[in-house]
Structure formats: C-alpha cells, structure tokens
Amino acid sequence: MLRRVAAILLSAACAAGCSAEYRAERRYWQAEQVAAPILKNPQAARPEQMAAAAAAYARVIQRVPGTLWAARAQGRIATLHVLQQDYDQARLAYQQLVRLYGRYPQLCLWAQQALARTYEAQDRWPEAVAAYEDLVEAHPWSQAALGMPLYVARGQEQRQPEQAERAYQLAVNRYLQWAARAPTAEVKVAIKHYLANAYQRLKQWPEAIGVLQELANQPNDPNRPLTLVTLGAIYQEKLQEPALAKAAYVQLIEAYPDHPLVQTAREQLERLPASSP
C-alpha cells in the first residue's frame, strides 16, 4: 500500500513538473511569435512592434520566473534593445540576466559577450575590454575566455597599430600563464593553439614552431591537420626549410588522406624545390 501511494505521489509530482515546463515553454513560444517579424527584418520593425514583443517577453518573466524560459526571455529583451541601438538599456538587461540567472551559465556567458559587443558597437573599446575581462573572470576556462586575449590583441591592432606588438606579447604572456595551470589536458591544448597563433602574429617563428610541433604530437587533437599544414607553411615560406615543410605536408597526407586540407598540402608540395629530399 505504501509503495502504491509513493508511486502515485511521484507520478503526480512528475506530471506537475512536466506541465509547468510545458506552460513555460509555450509562453516563451508565444512571445517568439510576436517577435518573429522583428527578428527577421529589424530595419522594417515599427516602435509599436518592438514594444509588443518586449511586453510579451516580460510576461514570460513575470509568469514563469526563475526558469530557463524566463532567462531566455530576458536575453530577448536585451536583443530588442540592441536592435533599437538603445545600448544602455541593453546592457542593463544583460546585467540582469547574469545577476538573476546564474544557474544557466551558458546563457550568462552569452550575455556577457553580447554586453561587451555593445561597447564595441559604440566604439568604446576600453570599456569593451573591461567587459571581456569580466567574462574571463566569470568563465575562466570557457572557449570564449580562452580566445579573449588574442581577440583583444587583434582589436587593439586594428585601433592602434603601433600598440599591436605589445598587445600580442601580453596575450603570449597570459597564455603561458594559463597553460601552466590548465585544469585539463584538453584545455591546455586549446590554450596552446591560441599561443601558437599569437607567436605567429608577432612573427616569432621559432617559438611558434615549438608550440606547433608539440601540438602536432597530439594525435587526438581535432585541429591537428590545420597544425600540420601551418607547420609546413612556416617552414616553407618563413624559414626556408623545404625538407621540414615537406615532412609536415607528407605527414598530413598520410595521416588524413580524406581531409580537405590534403589538397592544400599537395599544392604546396608542388611548389617546393625539386631537390627537396
């Protein structure tokens, strides 16, 4: 008898939970229908359409607070502000998402990236960099955080070319520090890819080669074909080492005969001096 009562209670709880989840998802879907014409063609959206969509998402937040669907609705409200170039309100909306919905880290990560981009849209680069630093602090080993030093260096290069070398050197220093304390082997490999890229931007070819050779020895790295073709290109074009270039290209062709980069490797092999061993 007790087992039967427990089963009935469990079934009722599951039904209630599933029903609540369905209602929350449906409310969000209804708001999406209101916003669909705006998201499809923002330039043609009228102010009253924007207001109606924002109100629809606000109702989701009000009626199913704390849920994933409420968090997504908060993100949509921020997006609507961005589409209207109301960046101050957009940032407030993104900040509220991060503050209230920390249980959904991927959404919070997205919100912090989007917030930083609002500063970029206004050409407020120092504030954008500060926002990206907040992202790195909040999500230290995410792909977005790992790519941030190189992204910031490239942004600095575009805006102040005379500061490019310093910016890339700062990225190198940071990647070296991160690689020394990476929590997993996979994260360390990802960091090394960014590090190799930063060395290449600095034209520090021996350092880049050292990291790329290390990565080439990672047979399970999905980026290994690109590593090998990059090695070959540096040996061929920057260091004038045709034998080493050939070795990298041949290794790629033999290890990954069906990979799209094989065609590039074959074309580069044809450009090597005929006397290359």
Image (spheres, rainbow, N blue to C red):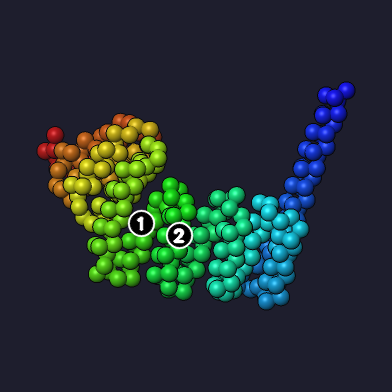
Specify the farthest residue to the bottom: 47
> Camera-side residue: 79 or 223?
79
Residue 135 coordinates in the image, percent (x, y)? 46, 57
Location of the C terminus by quadrant is top left
Q: Secondary structure at mark 1?
A: helix
Q: Which residue is mark 2?
A: 134
Location of the N terminus by quadrant is top right
Q: Eyeballing the image, is 173 above or below 225?
A: below
Q: Which residue is mark 1?
A: 149
> Camera-side residue: 270 or 213?
213
On the picture, is 24 further left or further right than 117?
A: right
What residue is at 25 percent from the left and 62 percent from the top?
166
Determine the CA span between mark 1 and mark 2: 13 Å
From the image, state whether disc 1 or disc 2 is nearer to you.
Answer: 2
What residue is at 68 percent from the left and 54 percent from the top?
66
What type is the residue that disc 1 sits on?
Pro
On the picture, is 193 further left or further right than 69?
A: left
What residue is at 39 percent from the left and 70 percent from the top?
126
Q: Secondary structure at mark 2?
A: helix
On the picture, is 31 further left or further right than 248?
A: right
Q: Eyeballing the image, is 217 above or below 20?
A: above
Q: Badge 1: how crowded within 10 Å, few (<14), some, or many (20+)?
A: many
Residue 72 coordinates in the image, percent (x, y)? 64, 56
Is disc 1 in contact with disc 2, using a CB cutoff of under 8 Å?
A: no
On the picture, is 204 further left or further right than 93?
A: left
Q: Earlier in the sequence, mark 1 or mark 2?
A: 2
Specify the farthest residue to the right: 1
Residue 247 coordinates in the image, percent (x, y)? 21, 35
The numbered mark at residue 137 is none
Q: Badge 2: how crowded within 10 Å, few (<14), some, or many (20+)?
A: some
What type is the residue that disc 2 sits on?
Asp
Q: Eyeballing the image, is 178 above or below 214?
A: below
